[in-house]
Image: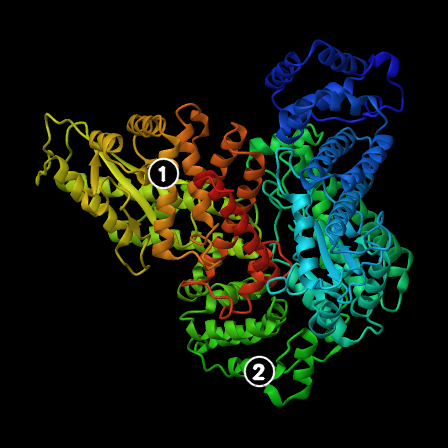
Amino acid sequence: MISSVKGDADAACLAARLADGPKLFAPIETERRLEDWLSDLTPQQSGEIRTLAGTFPQVKAILLGIAESSPYLFDLMCSDPDRMLRLLQGDPEGRLGRLIAKIWEAAEAADEAEAMRRLRAVKAEAALLIALCDVGGVWPVMQITAGLTDIAVAAVQSALRFLLRQETGRGRLNPPDLDYPEGGSGLVVLAMGKMGAGELNYSSDIDLIVFFDLAAPTLASGIEPQPFFVRLTQGLARLLQQRTGDGYVFRVDLRLRPDPASTQVAVSTVAALDYYEREGRTWERAAMIKARPCAGDQKAGEILIAEISPFVWRKHLDFAALAEVHDMKRQMQTFRGQSEIAVEGHNVKIGRGGIREIEFFAQTQQLVAGGRHPELRVRPTLDALNILASSDWITHQARDELTAAYLFLRRVEHRIQMVADEQTHALPADAEAMERFARFLGFEDRASFAAELLAHLDCVQGHYSRLFEGDPAGAEKLPVADYRSGPDDPRLLDHLTKLGFKQPRMVADTVQQWMAGGYRVLKAETTRIAFEAFVPTLIDGLARAEEPDSAVVTFDRFLQALQRGGRLISLLSQNRDLVALVALVLGAAPRLADMLARRPQIMDGLIDPRFFGAMPDRLELSTRLSATLQDADSYEEFLDRIRLFGQESLFLIGTRILSGTVSARQAGHVFADVAEGIVDTVHGLVNHQFVNQYGQISRQETAIVAMGKLGGREMTASSDLDLILLYDFDSDHPDSDGARPLQGAQYFARFTQRLISAFTTRTNYGVLYEVDMRLRPSGRSGPVASHIDSFAEYQEHEAWTWEHMALTRARVISSSPDFCERIERVIRDILMRPRDARLIASDVAEMRRAIALEKGEDDIWDLKNAAGGMVDIDFIAQYLQLVHAADMPDILNVDTQQALDNAQRLGVLSLPDAEILRPAARLYHDLTQILRLCVSDKFNPETAGDDLLPVLARAGDAPDFSALEARIRDTQADVRAVFLRLLEGKT
């Protein structure tokens, strides 16, 4: 045990150096949580911690902040109190150095299990040490990132050496030096991204590319290089990222290798160099700026970097190179609107003004000039900014402002990730969680944090938007183009080329047709004149789209379909920043494009200053809906207006999804809130109309219960409404009191049919929603509406397991408060019934097999039904709720991701499994939101448009579509493994 604090503590110990700490959101509750932990320790442990906290006040502030805001760090504290004391009483720099030295012990392990244990023990202690130094303000941000990187590099090197020694023992490798088996092997492990630059974030994946020499000089005779090194790479990834009872070391991402969707995880140097020479892309050039050999044959690694160098660093700044940089900027940039940034839910990495924009600001200028100016070939972002400033590529003010923003945003990023050790960059989405987070970061409240955050984001965005200001391609120096002249005018073709169009003749021909005024929408003289004046602005805006040539084609198709365009053209001409966004919508989302062509007025919402702010909550949506309906003077007009409201909402939310300014989860919630408001409004209207016609039954009640995606608040643009209608009435007086009375069940069956008709009848504004009521008791064979007592009886005695699974997502969305409470009590009682876990597991697994037989599970892009897809995750969450709700009612939640969080918190889902399932669910939702907007049938990457694939890659946070596809395959394999282990007992 560690000796007395007073005797050992000095100015060098971590506890004495803590200079900062979190503020508390709920101090009384947090004090109680910390005290509960201390009371569970041995008297000596708790005594030493209390003495430390009394001697150094910041110690208690740190402990309380962790207890309140970071389940991950609190678990590390609780699982090994002696480790916590050791860290607080020791010198942090010395301790980190000893941990790095200790990680090499894994290379000496007798077997893989022992190597895994040693690696994970060091990582856990290092993670806690580095977090304490960050939260306590002991180390600056870049010392934090350097410490994380040093641990990662040592872990990769140690794990690789262990594997090579194992292979040597099996006779497959003959290294000249047994203590250094990687030497001369021709095996190169490149660290990419933040690891390559020494800038790892707190819960970062490590991006590695593994190359090997086909000659493989140290391989034993008869051993084929490719299978050997592929297997070795898989073993390396397994040693580092496989989750055991001791956790994991680092998640490994191997998808930055050449063409990851079709290549093995280890690539020969010959094939790699050939790839980069023939088809390497701009983003791969940028990625290679930070590449450095981190493990394996160091000499071979340096040679490989030198051989790749000509691909990265071009000797001459020619027009093609500059065009590539413009393309890269266009592809990295998402439309972010003109108004304020919403703090809640903002992504500090890829969102407006975020870390990626600072990195891109530096990297693009390195790519442009690094070939001629070798001093620019540095890996760390801040080093690059410094050299750019000292070489007069940027101003010293730009460097200082971007540096300050980078350090602030990296600190925010670390604190986000410390909450649950997840690779996430998004701030909390709701106000209360945001208040907690701001205090965890050391701010007094959300407002003070938001003010500093927004100042940095706006500053970064300003510098980013001015990148290459002054038009380096020289387009502005050209004379004003004559867009009427067509493809035979060389000056027009040159102008279009300089703007970034790759098919200038096609563009010139298309624009010439526009100027001729032959399209129906341009027949009116005032519209045609306005459009002709707008064309230069339009072309400039379309040139800023991700795929400029495709944007022209899709805008042309849109123009031909447009019925009335005067207002739309006026809006676009007065809001030129919207042109690129509209081009994105037209090119990637035919469903939204068709909606815009038929109803140009729905674009009004895009110029609302609130559009790119916080997503509307239920109250705001309700206010908007009421305003839309307030002067409707007939039932038919009411139905039309509510459909228009639904379409406008879908268009605006869909545009936010495409532009990358709202997360899939936020979008799912708002889609559900829109549907819920509409359902409740239609329910009230139909009830009013029905009562006028048929009267009321004594003590009648009706309620609409949402199931499926609406119930779980995970709706997409194309979701149906899964509904159940429940009712009650005075059974002693079952007849309605109207002029045309109906009795009991007949009354409510006809009422339900009227309700369905209000949603599904096609009016001038189309269908409101398709309604699916198959989840009602007895499905299609049962009555369309159910008495609450019959519903309870059916669920208690007749329902199948799959019906109870569906019930985990049931949510009353329209009802009187008292009836709602009765229904919720019935549902909760059913879900909390004790169940046989093995029987439920068997039923769930059997249902999953039945779905696979009916729907298939081999298409990875069927994100719902694929093996390891969303159905697997939903079924796991539903299974855990059904078998544990009797003892742990807090596990219940209609939201799949929240149910998984609850299961992990309550100990019925392991942290390793939760850390597979939760990111997978987020990935599937992110991509599904895009696909439901943009694809009406089955998605096929081979036939998908050029606009859609980059949008999907960006939504999946992948550098390109090939990397995204590789990520999906890996994710589905991991999810299916969890499903089989939990539901079928397979390992």
Amino acid type indicated by mark 2: Met
| Helix, strand or loop at mark 1 | helix
Residue 473 can be seen in this image: no
Q: Quadrant of residue 204?
A: top right
User: What colouring method underlies this structural image?
Assistant: rainbow
Residue designated by label 1: 805
Residue contact between numbered discs 1 and 2, judged by CB atoms under 8 Å? no
Tell me if mark 1 has few (under 14), some (14-19) or many (20+) residues whose alpha carbon lies within 10 angstroms of its own.
many
| Helix, strand or loop at mark 2 | helix
Which residue occupies the foreground of this view, 41 or 494? 41
Location of residue 167 in the rendering, given as x and y in whole percent from the top left corner: 73, 51
In this rendering, which labeled residue sits more in front, label 1 or label 2?
Answer: 1
On residue 208, the disc is none
Which residue occupies the foreground of this view, 899 or 695? 899
Location of residue 649 in the rendering, given as x and y in whole percent from the top left corner: 43, 51
Which residue occupies the foreground of this view, 1 or 356? 1
Q: Which residue is drawn at the image coordinates 55% and 50% (left, top)?
A: 971
How far separated are the C-alphas under marks 1 and 2? 55 Å
Location of residue 677 in the rendering, given as x and y in whole percent from the top left corner: 37, 42
Q: Compared to 417, does 222 lie above or below?
A: below
Q: Quadrant of residue 581?
A: bottom right
Amino acid type indicated by mark 1: Met
Location of residue 586 in the rendering, given as x and y in whole percent from the top left corner: 50, 66
Residue designated by label 2: 506
Q: Compared to 770, does 241 lie above or below?
A: above
Quadrant showing the N terminus: top right
Q: Which residue is drawn at the image coordinates 42% and 42% (left, top)?
A: 875
